[in-house]
Amino acid sequence: MKRTLTAVILFMLLVLPYTSAASVIDESLGFISYTVADTNEIPKKALLLTALVSTVGKARNSTDALSTVMDVTKELLEIQNPDGGWGHYRGEVSTPQDTATVLIALGAVMELIKDYPTGISENDIEVAIRDGRTYLLTAFNGEGWGYLADSPTEFYPTALSLWALGTTGLTPEKSIAVEAGAEYLERARDLRPDYLALRLIAFKAIGYGNVTADLERCKELLSSAGLNERERAMLTYALVLYEPLSFDTGRALTVLELTGNDNGTYYLTSKEGPFLDTDSITPTAYAVMAFSSVADRLSGNFTNPKGELCSALAEGQNPDGSWGIHPGTHGSAKATYYAVRALKTCTPVPEGVDRAIEWAREHLTDAKDDAVLHGTVTEEYYYTVKLLAEFGDLSDDEKEELLNFTRSMEVFPGRWAGYFSIPQPYETAMGLDLLLELGAKGDDINASGEWLLSVTPDGWGIILNHLLGVMVGKNVPTTVEALESLIRVADIEKLRPHSDWLMAQRLDDGSWGHFGRSENILGEVSYGVGSMEYTVRAAEILDALGYDVKNDALKWVIDNLHNGTKTTVDTALALEFIKDVKFLPEVTLYETITALRGGLWELHYTGEYQTVAETIAPQLEELGSSVDLKGRVSKVEDGNHIFLAAPGDINVSRYNGEVTLKVRGQLVTVNGRTYPLASTIVIIPGRTQDGHVLMVLFAEQSSGAVELVFTSGLFKYFHGKYLVLEAKDSNGNGVIDPNEIKLLDAG
């Protein structure tokens, strides 16, 4: 009989349409959500709550599930008895088995609310769990638990009590009651299938015992025809806890899929025997918990921050084509310049860029008037000319006219005035930069650079006395402006003291503010506040000067992208700074397999893997995707892709920054762990900018094993950050059998 059923299961694996863990989870939510609210039996309500919690984040839409979790949890908290326990119905006497089932559910909710807001008080749940645990420990009879407190020991309440106490952190080493209860369960013989499942689950919860024999019997039972749906679901859940990825697990899960009602709502109905009611709650709950155990939380809809910033900048443009320092404010040449520069990196480049250049042309007259009014190069004039010089396609005559105007503002050759109407580093740096931007040559350029380097040994601020060269208030923006200009004309070694000073101003979090550390005449010390503008500009110029600062600055910028106090300049500079970053959200194999349920996928392979590609393509299409075979392995930017290649032929980090893979000789190393190249299969999920990637990397001699993984349907239950499988022909028959493929690592 066992051989017959095994053959039937293998036939079903090979020929029946695939569903997946994802579809079972999605299609079970309606049944669970309705039933958990409808039933008045507390243990059934709690079991369904445990199952529902297990689906949150793994279903395509968890909003309704979260709402139901909140409602049911509040109800269970409200009906807890004064002794800390729960009965079978509201107000009934507390029992160990009913209390244990609720504690298991509340423990699952406690884990959930660490990541998902539910509106439930964490303290209320902690108190309920504490009181429930106290009840269970009080109900312990010295050997185990009975159906009532201090009643004779029975297997069922003892198994559930151990499971519950294990979820609260108790183990045989920490609790005499848990140790005694575990020994009682261990002595039990000839267990019926559901009790065998409960013993495996309870022992897993408390970390107890050698369960090898129980696992083997579990597998034998799952390969037999004598189980009802409740027993099969419980045994499958128990097996998944110990073997989250194996062919035995895959077969067991497939049977659960195929025996469930397939009308868009997944549930199981168990026939308990003549004259007994059928049970849909228990088998469905355990089945869903089993499928959820081989699923990972989905990352949700991923929004590329570069796209967000491009949109935010484009939307902040004023009707006249300019940008204000803050969205909706009067046009600023500085804000407009940086906005245009950043938007030039967007794809496609927004049409508003052309309007901004036209605005700058019209604004030039006002900018000149501002310079004349102040008798120097002002920021408004500087950034207007910068914008036109870089993006305005100025004619030679226009450049010459602007050069003459800029030079007319000099108070000495190569120097421009600022505070106190004397030459200042900030204005001089802007003037020098404009001369260079407009293509000038002449003595004033050299004079400007030499003067800037002569007025201070390190860093720039404000000069109080032109003749004595007294400088105060050295700061980051002035120093950055000076370095940005001087790097184009001065020897880098001459800039080193100033760049070292700038480096010393870096704050502890990797950012730059107006200054780093400042001490006034009273000895009072203050520290700067990180600025997006100063951080990006300081990091860029220091990177150009050879300092290793960009990665730390990049982390700070990314962490602060959604700081609501950003100016237009901040947003623009942040966008430029991250333009080359490949933003790939964390991805799991479960999410990638879920994506395989639809859409167009390109299957890339090298010549020696053509047979594998042609073999597995139909299996992928059975899952719901459309597969296009590509007889080459090439770099991709977008869309959905599967790669069949040898380890080392794919740049894994391009699509998944969390996984590293290196090949040296006959060894392959994955995230620091090394395996034999010939017998190792590495399966890694990844991302493109708008799609998914599945990388299946293996030596040619493992081709048969890879085909088996896909044709058997085992791939449907891939989960984790990556998988490392071993495929060895241990019996020497020349073929890789299912029992010769072993899981080495699940990331």
Image (cartoon, rainbow, N blue to C red):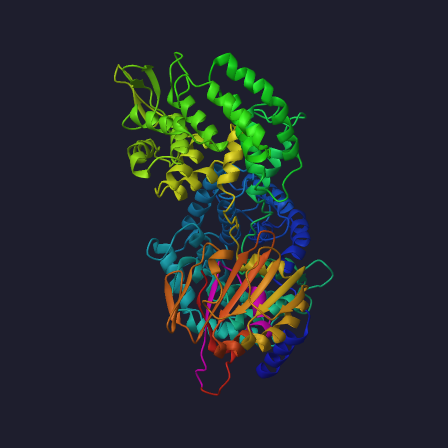
Q: Is residue 545 left or right of residue 623?
A: left
Q: Is residue 431 above or below residue 262?
A: above
Q: Is residue 663 left or right of residue 283?
A: left
- Numbered range of the magenta stretch: 709-731
Where residue 615 appears, as percent x and y from the top left, is 62, 76
Where residue 643 appears, as percent x and y from the top left, is 55, 66
Looking at the image, which residue is at 40% across and 62% down?
182
Q: Quadrant of the N terminus?
A: bottom right
Displayed quadrant of residue 364: top right
Q: Nearer the viewer, residue 450 or 505?
A: 450
Count of marks placed on residues: 0
Where residue 702 appears, as percent x and y from the top left, is 49, 77
Residue 594 belongs to magenta span: no
The answer to whether any part of residue 231 appears in the image is no
Q: Nearer the viewer, residue 23 or 659?
A: 659
Q: Is residue 656 above or below residue 728?
A: above
Q: Nearer the viewer, residue 373 or 297?
A: 373
Displayed quadrant of residue 432: top left
Q: Nearer the viewer, residue 77 or 316?
A: 316
Q: Is residue 472 left or right of residue 191?
A: left
The answer to whether any part of residue 312 appears in the image is yes
Displayed quadrant of residue 552: top left
Q: Is residue 452 above or below residue 14?
A: above
Find the residue positioned furthest to the right: 263
Q: Is residue 250 above or below residue 59?
A: below
Looking at the image, which residue is at 40% across and 55% down?
141
Where residue 508 appears, as percent x and y from the top left, is 34, 34
Q: Quadrant of the C terminus?
A: bottom left
Residue 710 belongs to magenta span: yes
